[in-house]
């Protein structure tokens, strides 16, 4: 004999499981579609950001070039005004073009940048020296000559960067051409 209540509960339970499974499948599809759409938006957004970043970097490089041109004209005391930077084109330049422009600017400015770096390094070494002397006192005295030696090397490098490179003085060269007969006679006389 079967129990009608148990049968009904069992039927209802199977029906709920079946509907639950269908709901899980629908929820899985919704989550999957949402994740796909979110990733597509991220991909599109990141490419837009990357393109905008290249455009912005290109504009900054153009501004630096325009500033350099204006400074060069001012130094040359020309009365002409500096040219306006070129308007940004619709497409962003490639990373290779941007890096080439940056390398050009770096080569032009490397002495100035090196001097700034060395000046900052001198300041940091001085600050380190003072802090260590205050904190460790006599115990720091053993290391202090080494720190001051590094400071003097940095100062020497800074001074050398500031000096214009002097061309080496030409050294006269004297060339003598010897015949075989002269060298053979010298060898026999020396031998």
Image (cartoon, rainbow, N blue to C red):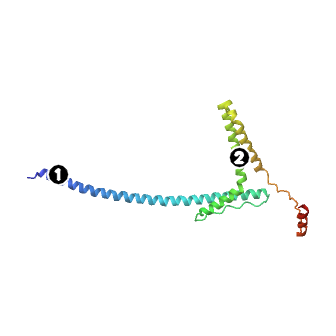
Q: Is residue 12 left or right of residue 26?
A: left
Q: Is residue 178 left or right of residue 28?
A: right
Please name the residue that numbered disc 2 is placed on.
118
- Residue at horizontal 71 percent and vertical 57 percent from the top: 108
The spot of residue 149 in percent (x, y) is: 73, 41
The spot of residue 37 in percent (x, y) is: 42, 60
| Residue 177 can be seen in this image | no
- Residue at horizontal 60 percent and vertical 65 percent from the top: 89
Q: Residue furthest top?
A: 138
Dot label at residue 9:
1
- Residue at horizontal 61 percent and vertical 58 percent from the top: 57
Tag 2's secondary structure?
A: helix
Is residue 69 placed above or below 142 in the rendered structure?
Answer: below
Q: Residue furthest front?
A: 191
Q: Quadrant of residue 21?
A: bottom left
- Mark 1 or 2, closer to the camera: 2
The number of callouts visible is: 2
Q: Is residue 21 left or right of residue 145?
A: left
Q: Residue furthest left?
A: 1
């Amino acid at each position: 004999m079967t129990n009608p209540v148990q049968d009904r509960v069992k039927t209802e339970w199977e029906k709920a499981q079946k509907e639950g499974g269908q709901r899980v499948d629908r929820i899985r599809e919704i989550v999957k579609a949402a994740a796909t759409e979110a990733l597509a938006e991220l991909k599109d957004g990141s490419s837009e950001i990357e393109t905008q970043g290249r455009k912005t970097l290109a504009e900054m490089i153009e501004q630096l070039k325009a500033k350099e041109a204006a400074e060069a004209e001012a130094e040359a005391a020309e009365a002409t005004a500096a040219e306006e930077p070129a308007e940004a084109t619709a497409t962003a330049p490639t990373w290779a073009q941007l890096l080439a422009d940056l390398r050009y600017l770096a080569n032009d400015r490397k002495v100035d940048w090196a001097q700034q770096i060395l000046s900052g390094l001198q300041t940091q070494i001085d600050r380190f020296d003072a802090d260590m002397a205050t904190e460790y006192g006599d115990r720091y005295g053993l290391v202090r000559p080494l720190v001051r030696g590094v400071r003097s090397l940095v100062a020497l490098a800074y001074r050398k960067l500031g000096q214009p490179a002097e061309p080496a003085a030409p050294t006269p060269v004297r060339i003598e051409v010897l015949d075989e007969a002269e060298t053979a006679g010298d060898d026999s006389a020396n031998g």
